[in-house]
Amino acid sequence: MRILTYSFETVLHMDSAVSEHDFVLRCQPMSTFAQTVLDAQTVITPQTALSQQIDGFGNLLQIGRIESPHDVFSFVSTGMVVVDAADEHPELAHPIHKRPSAMTQPTAEMIAFARDVLRVIPNARPQAKAQALSHALHEKMSYTPGTTDVETAAADAFSQMSGVCQDYTHILIALLRAEGIPARYVNGLMVGEGATHAWVEFHDDVRWHGIDPTNDRAIDDTYIAISHGRDFTDCPIESGVFRGGARQEQLVSVIVGSEQ
């Protein structure tokens, strides 16, 4: 068990003013069996009122609208969370997490890769299979920022064998689902990262377990989960629409500290 403090800021710079800006944020963690939120705050600039909802995956949504023209939009999320990754209670997995999603459609090459990795452990439990696939992917992939973007699907990242944490996560989800193992995408934070992070949760027929293919390690008390879904498109930290043709530049800064 560990107490973590977090602060992350996202700033969107537009090259011209926009207005009628509707946005949805998933930037605050929720209390679960594995983590308890002690404090959480969000500050928006330009200042506007926020309403809260819970989406179909159980994520906290903060929804707002900025009517007036603006060329900068930012939000700062801060808080404190008690994390106990070992506290994994039994929980059912919805069948939706066994099916390919838009970003996790496997190719024949991906399925062949998974079968080749698992041929020596064909009857292993889901946890052993997830660890083997994560390790093989970590060994084969090259962590290369700038070679993919948020719209890159698992198949495209796998074909070039490079990408970032989102790509590692999408690929591992696709491989696990191809083996009949329910898997979901998690957006969150971790100690030592300067940006948001993504990892996988897989189900072993009893409960969910977290694994980080980018770093080839099990999720422990240095991770804070913020949102989850079938893939990235279900749980982005920020999304929105506005009136105007501005181009955007996004800057993200994350600090996660440990109190214990």
Image (cartoon, grey):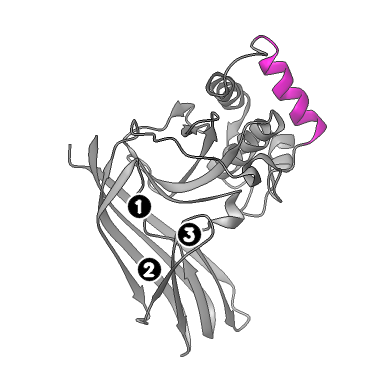
Picture coordinates of residue 8, whole percent (x, y): 34, 57
Q: Is residue 144 visible to us here?
A: no
Mark 2 highlights which residue? 75
Identify the residue under disc 1: 254
The residue at 64%/43% (across/down) is 95
Residue of label 3: 237
Quadrant in which the C terminus is drawn: top left
Please identify the residue farthest to the top as the structure is shown: 120
Q: Amino acid at mark 1?
A: Val
State which tag comes first along the sequence, 1 or 2: 2
Q: In the picture, which quadrant includes the N terminus?
A: top left
Magenta segment: 107-120
Q: Residue at x 47, y 33 (%)?
A: 207
Q: Please, is residue 183 above or below residue 132 in the view?
A: below
Tell me the SS state at disc 3: loop
Q: Amino acid at mark 3?
A: Ile
